Image (cartoon, coloured by chain):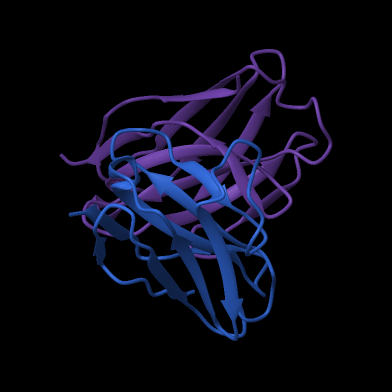
Amino acid sequence: QSALTQPASVSGSPGQSITISCSGTNSDVGGYNFVSWHQHHPGKAPKLIIFNVSERPSGISNRFSGSKSGNTASLTISGLQPDDESDYFCSSYTSSRAYVFGSGTTVTVL
Amino acid sequence: QVQLQESGPGLVKPSGTLSLTCAVSGVGVSSAYEFWWSWVRQPPGKGLEWIGEIHHSGITNYNPSFKSRVDMSVDESKNQISLHLTSTTVADTAIYYCARGSYYTWWNWGQGTLVTVSS
């Protein structure tokens, strides 16, 4: 199972919106609405911010939103804040009854 | 709150067995039917890789890439999960994470533990 494709890095200024893409195939992202996004500060436990493509867990800011079109899922962070500077990775359930992760994206707040 | 903590030897010799435990606090490993417990790893400079998952009933679901080498178990009395990976090579050097899953995502993760396979 190949990893999902994410841009290596995305940057934006405070207050701006940025979008991170997560490209897969119709055997994973395109085939199921089980795409998740996690925020991960290196050395710390990853934190779930989006599940089921666009749902937010309790306590997650509505500045984080998710969507999907075809085989590509997206995470948008609006009103970018310095605290948003982190690594982000996507994941998807697959037709092999397994899970696959994205390659990870580093978000930099300029 | 739910916390997970991985532990185990940081160094394993090639061809040896990598054994890790994940201590769970704040929730019982079998307190909800929908809980599945996963192991995920990240080799240096690479992306995350799902190793597999175990239900508290003992049902397992392994990544085919590891199927012949991996074994997971649940110890309800100690409230912990275990991972055993046999026939290790340097390619198994990675940060290993445990995570609590349900409904096709992971709600809680440990901070991870680095395991180096080297002679």
Q: Residue at x 25, y 45 (%)?
A: B14
* B33 relative to B99 in the view: left or right: right
Q: Quadrant of residue B72?
A: top right
* A14 relative to B50 in the view: left or right: left
Task: Give the quarter of the figure containing the C terminus of chain B.
Answer: top left
Q: Residue at x 33, y 40 (%)?
A: B16
Closer to the camera in the image, B60 or B36:
B36
Residue B61 in sight: yes
* B15 relative to B38 in the view: left or right: left
Q: Which color has been applied to chain A in this rendered view?
A: blue
Q: Quadrant of residue A27?
A: bottom right
Position in image of residue B62 (x %, y %): 60, 55
The correct choice, above or below, for A41 with respect to B44 in the image is above
Letter of the purple chain: B
Q: Quadrant of residue A52?
A: bottom right
Task: Give the quarter of the figure containing the N terminus of chain B.
Answer: top right
Extreme residue in the right direction? B33
Position in image of residue B89 (x %, y %): 28, 52
Position in image of residue B18 (x %, y %): 39, 37
Q: Residue at x 64, y 13 (%)?
A: B78
